[in-house]
DNA sequence: CATATATGAATTGTATGCAATATTAGAATT
DNA sequence: AATTCTAATATTGCATACAATTCATATATG
């Protein structure tokens, strides 16, 4: 496969891993040197990431890691909540044994991680659980949208799972979601997933606001919207 | 602004206008000649459109206008239905006089176009109506997602509005949606919008299937999935 | 006649160079 | 000292050149 696609993945990974923080510049020359290629494929990768909303590419002014305002971030979580609840609704309607088993397995893994208080592991297993629900919607397009948004929010979700009791609460919410999907109760599945996702957004927004209010504001959150 | 961004818009417009049909190749050389630029900004525009899912960019094999399979198309409409109903639900919850007025104006315009049987005009006004609902959700991120998907589906929606009675039915459905939003009935608004959008998808899928069955199959719809 | 293979043409992928614009630092003026 | 203007510097945008791969055509082979 072409370099530009590999680079796109590498840069995205670096951003997700937190190597580049929101607000950091992604200048073409240094990325080109880092990966040992010319600016051309770097540019192409950056433009693609920009089109996906992952980073902010401002004409003639270079690319930076997006810095969503608290408002924007809340909007993103709210949208995630709506999309996830749609997945849950469809999953409840269309559940197959395969998808059921996949969700069950992911849930079990979450359970173990939560019991051990391993938030890093829970973060990974939680992702699998949610992805299992996306797939269970049996609408691959919707699932793709959900994946994409989940990735964009991962940086913010991770911070949020640090608290141990949040881990256990999250697990309980998962159980409730699973129950509703299995019962074929579309409405309940949708509501529970919606709340499960949105509570994260609310908590995170509060946290960001709290931070900037207490004076320990980072560059994130203090700037105006991304547009 | 840079050329690549203008070109991205131009190419997108050309696709939406139906100048390039699903399956058509978008080769860099001829586009470069057409717009009087080198291949570089064309490539950049195509890659961005590819990242947005608007076209299909296959490494080393060039770009083509996406050819969603009937299944994929149905999934896209179903996703659109879910996103629109989310917009409607939020709009019902948060409606402001400004947004109400905007929806009302767009609805009136649709009414005139429908009375005159001008499907081309209705197509444009219909778009405004739906966009007014997206904005009324007061979640700009969700609205952006809705805009983007609406654009991707526009080629398929247009064909569908040709039938005159469908115009009038669409208008009536709009009225019902508006009523529910104004009443603040989130559930009803969501359901009505969902059905309004999904019926288009179902009709279109039927049409595509009918076409390919009757032997008058175009390139669209007969190929396997986009991936 | 159908299939496989090889050769040439066309197309995409990357590197490099230069032009255009933005950013920064410094000098001049108030 | 602060502000505005100017010049130097750095960075992005685009064009061109070449390399790598795919696609098309024709030829050979069973």
Image (spheres, coloured by chain):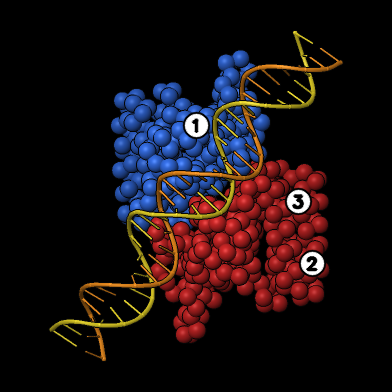
Chain colours: A blue, B red, C orange, D yellow
**Chain of the residue that carries numbered disc 3 in the rendered image:** B
For mark 1, name the chain.
A
**In the figure, is residue B32 to the left or right of B117?**
left
Label 2 is found on which chain of the structure? Answer: B
The residue tagged with tag 1: helix, strand or loop? Answer: helix
Disc 3 is placed on an element classified as: helix
Q: Is residue B78 visible?
A: no
> Looking at the rendered structure, which numbered label has been put on residue A112?
none
Q: Which residue is mark 3?
A: B182
Residue B110: where, in percent of width, then height?
77, 65
- What residue is shown at x 69% (from left), y 57% (from top)? B130
Q: Secondary structure at mark 2?
A: helix
Up/down of B217 relative to A195, above or below = below
The residue where tag 1 is placed is: A156
Please give the residue where the numbered disc 2 appears in the rendered image: B111
Of residues C27 and A90, the one drawn nearer to the viewer in this rendering: C27
How far is disc 2 from disc 3 in space, using C-alphas? 18 Å
């Amino acid at each position: 496969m072409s370099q530009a696609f590999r680079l796109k993945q590498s840069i995205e990974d670096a951003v997700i891993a937190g190597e580049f923080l929101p607000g950091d510049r992604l200048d073409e020359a240094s990325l080109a040197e880092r990966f040992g290629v010319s600016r051309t494929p770097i540019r192409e990768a950056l433009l693609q990431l920009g089109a996906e909303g992952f980073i902010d590419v401002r004409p003639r002014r270079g690319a930076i890691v997006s810095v969503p305002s608290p408002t924007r971030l809340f909007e993103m979580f709210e949208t995630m909540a709506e999309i996830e609840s749609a997945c849950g609704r469809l999953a409840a309607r269309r559940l197959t044994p395969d998808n059921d088993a996949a969700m069950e397995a992911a849930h079990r893994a979450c359970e173990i991680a939560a019991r051990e208080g391993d938030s890093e592991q829970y973060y990974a297993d939680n992702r699998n659980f949610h992805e299992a629900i996306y797939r269970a919607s049996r609408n691959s397009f919707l699932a793709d949208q959900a994946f994409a948004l989940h990735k964009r929010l991962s940086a913010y979700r991770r911070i949020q799972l640090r608290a141990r009791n949040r881990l256990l609460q999250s697990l309980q919410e998962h159980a409730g979601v699973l129950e509703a999907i299995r019962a074929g109760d579309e409405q309940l599945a949708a509501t529970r997933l919606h709340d499960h996702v949105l509570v994260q957004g609310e908590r995170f927004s509060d946290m960001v606001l709290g931070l900037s209010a207490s004076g320990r504001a980072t560059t994130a959150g203090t700037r105006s919207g991304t547009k």
